Amino acid sequence: MPRGDKDRYTGKQKRKAAHIAQSYEERGVLHDEAEARAWATVNKDSGGGNLSGSGRGKPDSHAAERRKAADRSAAAKKGWETRRRRVQG
């Protein structure tokens, strides 16, 4: 299989990559870069193509969707400060 061939990906993985790429393009990222980022995200979530003979049956990790505890904590603190300021102001 040549490098970059998408034959081993499921329809769901292809749709997911298309939606991610479209989102990047709407935010001003060039088409080729958006495609590369989208497939990198799909690969990180699912470990690559999941059609027969390529590890099908392994659950998706959704690793790209996870946030670190420190990020969640920082977001919570920021939200708390914003709410506190609005009540006082």
Image (cartoon, rainbow, N blue to C red):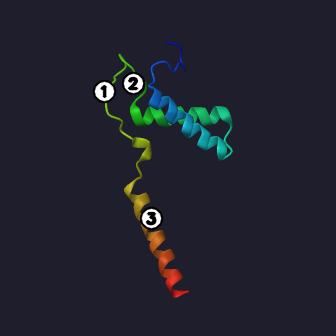
Marks 2 and 3, the one that precedes in the sequence: 2
Residue pointed to by mark 3: 74
Q: Earlier in the sequence, mark 1 or mark 2?
A: 2
The image shows residue 9 at horizontal and vertical percentages of 45, 24
Separation of residues labelled 1 and 3 (CA atoms): 36 Å
> What kind of residue is marked 3?
Ala
Q: Horizontally, is 86 left or right of 80 in the view? A: right
Identify the element where label 2 is drawn: loop
Q: What residue occupies the far bottom of the structure in this picture?
A: 88
User: Where is residue 27 drawn, in percent x and y?
Assistant: 65, 47
Give the image location of residue 35, x and y in percent: 59, 32
Are the residues tagged 1 and 2 within 8 Å (C-beta)?
A: yes
From this view, report whether residue 79 is shown above or below residue 53: below
Disc 2 to disc 3, C-alpha distance? 36 Å
Q: Residue at x 40, y 64 (%)?
A: 73
x 49%, y 37%: residue: 41
Q: CA distance from mark 1 to mark 2?
A: 7 Å
- Quickly name the residue at label 2: 50
Q: Which residue is mark 1?
A: 57
